[in-house]
Amino acid sequence: MIMIDRLIEQALLEDIHTGDITTLAVVPGERPASARLIAKENLVVAGIATAARVFTILDPAICFKACLNDGEKAEPGTQLATVHGEAAHLLMGERVALNLLQRMCGIATLTARFVEAVSGTKARIVDTRKTTPGLRQLEKYAVRIGGGINHRTGLYDGVLIKENHIVAAGSITEAIRRARVYIPHTLKIEIETETLAQVNEALTAGADIIMLDNMSLDDMRVAVVTIDGRAQVEASGGVNLERVRAIAETGVDIISVGALTHSPRAMDISMLLD
């Protein structure tokens, strides 16, 4: 919560700065008010507590009551929450609360669509580090709410040897050897491959997870058979809703989808004062 509070405080400072001149001019003094957060399209709810925190950071006396919990589905016209407090504080927090809530609902909704698209297969939908700077914790939380799984959070909590690492190390074999020497036994080593020859080298070198990057469906099928359960198999690159089912049916274990966090559409949500 300390990290989230700092994020919200920074967002409020960015928006309000030296003062909300419109609200100061139009709504002077004390004026109690109530407002409703309303979904204007079908969505998966995510970020209700975050929206609530925006208002209570502005004014601890504000009463925020959630009508739906994260993970529940809403239809157009569904009331997501009510907010009661000073009108000026509700207006000052409106945009930041909606920005965060709309984006988190967008991520959860898109993730749920990908998860549904691969239902019945063993493939799991995971996110990537392609997140909005500063919002990673919130965005990865929204992925989980949508039924997805988080990949590594950052560069510090997982080993993923990518193309440029391989070039710098000289080979897949050498990159894996160096990683194995350096990391504790509790961490796994994942490596990115682009060809079936690289898959074989990664397997021989002892990779725990082998990423198939931008491979054709036919090559993915061959790779899955070649690996034969000796490592987890992740598919990545060019994944969209039209193609994800076919990728899952190749037999991969994991499908990473950058689009979950780098290009979701913000959901349409309004705040209406009564």
Image (cartoon, rainbow, N blue to C red):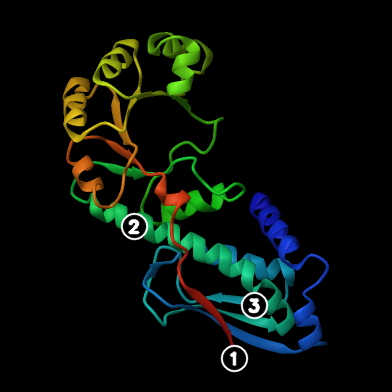
Using the image, tell me which numbered label, if any, was put on residue 112.
2
Percent across and percent down for residue 108 are 41, 58
According to the image, label 1 marks what residue?
274
Residue 174 placement (x, y as % from top left): 43, 8
Residue 89 vertical position relative to residue 202 in the rendered view, above or below:
below
Q: Amino acid at mark 1?
A: Asp
Q: Is residue 260 positioned above or below 249 on the image? A: below
**Location of residue 124 (image quadrant):** top left
Q: Quadrant of the C terminus?
A: bottom right
Q: Earlier in the sequence, mark 1 or mark 3?
A: 3
> Which residue is located at x 71 percent, y 65 percent?
15
Q: Mark 2 is on which residue type?
A: Ala
Q: Secondary structure at mark 2?
A: helix
Q: Quick check: 125 above or below 13?
A: above
The three-letter code of the residue at mark 3 reads Cys
Q: Nearer the viewer, residue 81 or 96?
A: 96
Bin the neighbour count of mark 3 within 10 Å (Cα to Cα): few under 14, some 14-19, many 20 and up: some
Q: Secondary structure at mark 1?
A: loop
**Does residue 97 appear to the left or right of 147 in the view shown?**
right
Give me the residue at 63% from left, 74% from top: 94
Sequence-wise, which precedes: disc 2 or disc 3? 3
Residue located 74% across and 72% down the image: 59
Mark 1 neighbour density, 10 Å: few (under 14) some (14–19) many (20 or more): few
Left or right of 193 in this view: 89: right
CA distance for labels 2 and 1: 33 Å
Report the mark closest to the observer, 1 or 3: 1
